[in-house]
Every structure is written in C-alpha cells, then in structure tokens.
Amino acid sequence: MSKRKRILSGIQPSGTIHIGNYFGAVENWVRLMADYDCFFTIVDLHAITVTYDPALLPQRVWDAALDNMAAGLDPEKCTIFVQSHVPEHTELCWLLTCVTPLGELGRMTQFKEKSERERENVTTGLLNYPILMAADVLIYKADAVPVGEDQTQHLEFTREVARRFNGRFGDYFPEPAVLIGRGARVMGLDGMSKMSKSLDNFIGIGEEPEAIWEKLRPAKTDEARKRRSDPGNPDRCNIFSYHKLVTPEAGLREIVAGCTGATIGCIDCKKIFHRNLMKVLDPIRERRRSLAEHPDRVRDALAEGARKARLAARETLDGAKKLMGLL
Ligand code: TYM
C-alpha cells in the first residue's frame, strides 16, 4: 500500500478542456502527480444530470481522456478512469444519500444555477449531484481535492457528508482538504462570467493558434481605455488576468508599464498573451495529435485505471457497508 497522501479530482466530459479547467485544476493535477497517490476521473454520470445527447457522450468522454492525457496526466503516475466504469461510486452514493438531509441539496449554488437553465428537466440526479461528488472523493478516502474555486461549496458539502457519516457510524472517512489551482477562477472572454463551456466564452486547450487569436481579438479589455492613447488599468483588464497565468514576472512588469503609460495598445498586449499562451498549449496540442493516432494507449490507460480504482473503491465501500450494518 502506498504511504503517499491521496488525491481525487474529476472533470466533466463537456467536449473540450478550456484554459479555465487547465489553470484552475488540470495543471495542478499534473504537478501533484509527483507527490500524491492520484485518482482522476471523467465524470460521465454527472454529465447525464442535465439534458444531453446520448449519441455524443462517448466521443465527449473520449475527448476528455485525450485532453487530460495530452495536458500531462500520465497513466504511469496516476490512476485515470471513467466514473461509470467504477460502479462502486454509485453504490456509495446511495449509502450517503441516506445520511444527507434533503434541505441542504436545494441550497447548493450550482443546483440553483443549473435548474434555472434546465427548467423543463430538473431531475433528482441534478439535485443529488453533490452526493455523487462526495462519493467520488470519499470512496478513495482522499486527503485532498484539487479544484477551481467554483467547486469549494461542493467540497464543503463533501466534508459535511463525511462528518455526518462518521458521527452516526464511527470515524471512517477523512475530511478532505481543498487545493485551489493557480487560476482559481478564470473569467470568460466576455470578462463577465466564469469561463465555461456552456457560456461559449472559452478558449479550448486543443484549439488551433489562429482560432484562438480570432477569439482573443474581440475579447473584453479595460472598458475605460477607449483609444490607444488612453492610459489603461491592468487590474481592470481581463486580458491582464490571463497574462498572469502565462507571462513571466519581467514580461508582466513591461505590460503594466506599457498599459498604464499607453505605450502599448490592447491588440499588442493580446498578441503577447497569445504568444505566451501558445508556448503552453502548442506541446499539449502536439501530444494530443500523437495520442489520437494511438487510441490503444488511451483505451489501455482507462481500462487499467478502472481496474486499479475499483480495487481501492471496493475496499472502502465494504468498510462503509459493514459500519452501516449491511453485511
Ligand atoms: P468541471 O468539469 O466543471 O471542471 C473541472 C475542473 O475545472 C475547474 N474549473 C475552473 N477553474 C477556474 N476557472 C474556471 N473558469 C473553471 N471552470 C472549471 C473546476 O473547478 C474543476 O476543478 N463537479 C465537478 C466535477 C467533479 C469533481 C468530483 C471534482 C465530479 N466529482 C470530485 C472534484 C472531486 C465539475 O463539474 O467540474
């Protein structure tokens, strides 16, 4: 048994990983592989809590696996798997459902937002989403969960589920710590809301450089800077918040001086960001291309990942059932 601390995190198969996912979570996962016993899952069972097209789901799961592996998740150094391939998650989810008061679920921010969007199809699955997420984490007795800021409420809920279970049946689940990535909350290209696939305000990590430039060119900057000769305020500029993710210190100082002194325009500033971003994304796109040519590598990684995950998950599930008087 590994003595390293354990982490678990998950990502929805929503078509493509965007730079919000990457700088908020995935980049951190890649770094943490060196020091933790890592489990990463593509959460297809969460994806079906809202309206979706069953014909598209397999490709989306596949794309998520390719994106994550291309971004640096190495199946030799972590366990990467598809959530529905490890049915123990749903079994633990049911057990945890039976210790979760109904009232708390309806108060979750993400439930409120999504049920607003899904008016015609607010399922019990959507309501129970956070319990399945708690099961994802607790079934590996994870010590920590690396995520972006938008998941902190769900993880506080996970900690409460653990406390409630432990209080009722005996100390069993650790309360996981939350590890927030460098880009805790990457804003969308509109500068108004969090970058997200569903709001179509994103830059995908696998997009071609030209396509990314076409999205960046009209993207929101400091609104007060109407003409190139107007001095800008980098702290009010969404593009500057992006720069902080990819531009080295010295480069950032030059941007601040150029923007406040009106010696560089917004388009120049975006060009520099684009160049620096592509230094991160070019190798990812290359790796993705080569992985796509060897689908067996991805298939094998997911099969081996599910096998390893099931071993760990079964052990925790059996212990929980025993404590609940189910064996
Ligand atoms: P998901 O698929 O929405 O996002 C995956 C990860 O990316 C982070 N993220 C962001 N970080 C910064 N800025 C953004 N604009 C941004 N958008 C997304 C998310 O915080 C997340 O870390 N419910 C989860 C999936 C999940 C999970 C889990 C996570 C299921 N079970 C267990 C952790 C542990 C979700 O929908 O993430």
Image (tube, grey):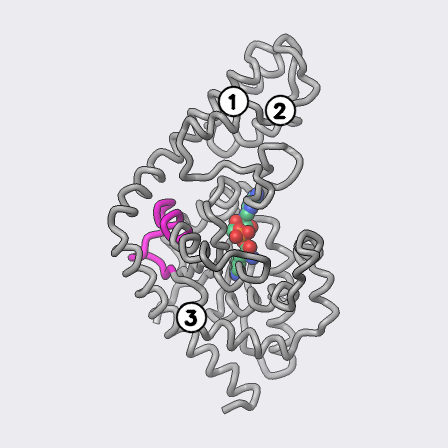
Disc 2 crowd rating (10 Å Cα; few below 14, some 14-19, many 20+) is many
Q: Disc 1 marks which amino acid? A: Lys
Q: CA distance from mark 2 to mark 1?
A: 9 Å
Q: Which residue is found at the position 68% from the left and 52% from the top? A: 117
Query: Do tag 2 and tag 1 residues touch (Cβ < 8 Å)?
Result: yes
Q: Report the quarter where the N terminus lies.
A: bottom left
Does 187 sit above or below residue 141? above
Report the side of 304 relative to 261 (left or right): left
Does the magenta portion include 74? Answer: yes
Q: Quadrant of residue 119?
A: bottom right
Tell me: 316 left or right of 262: left
Residue 34 shown left or right of residue 200 in the figure: left
Could you tell me how far apart the alpha carbons at marks 3 and 1 are, in whole angstroms?
43 Å
Q: Is residue 284 magenta?
A: no
Q: Which mark is residue 270?
A: 1
Instruction: Measure the C-alpha gap from mark 2 to mark 3.
Output: 44 Å
Residue type highlighted by circle 2: Thr
Q: Is residue 161 left or right of residue 292?
A: right
Residue drawn at point x = 59 percent, y = 36 percent: 188
- State whether residue 32 appears in this view: no
The image shows residue 45 at horizontal and vertical percentages of 51, 64
Q: Which residues are magenta?
A: 64-80
Secondary structure beneath label 2 = loop
Image marks 3 and 1: residues in contact by CB distance under 8 Å: no
Q: Position of residue 36 (x, y in %)?
A: 40, 58
Under circle 3, the secondary element is: loop
- In this rendering, is residue 45 above or below 99? above
Pointer 3: what residue? 86
Residue at 62% of width from left, 55% of height from top? 152
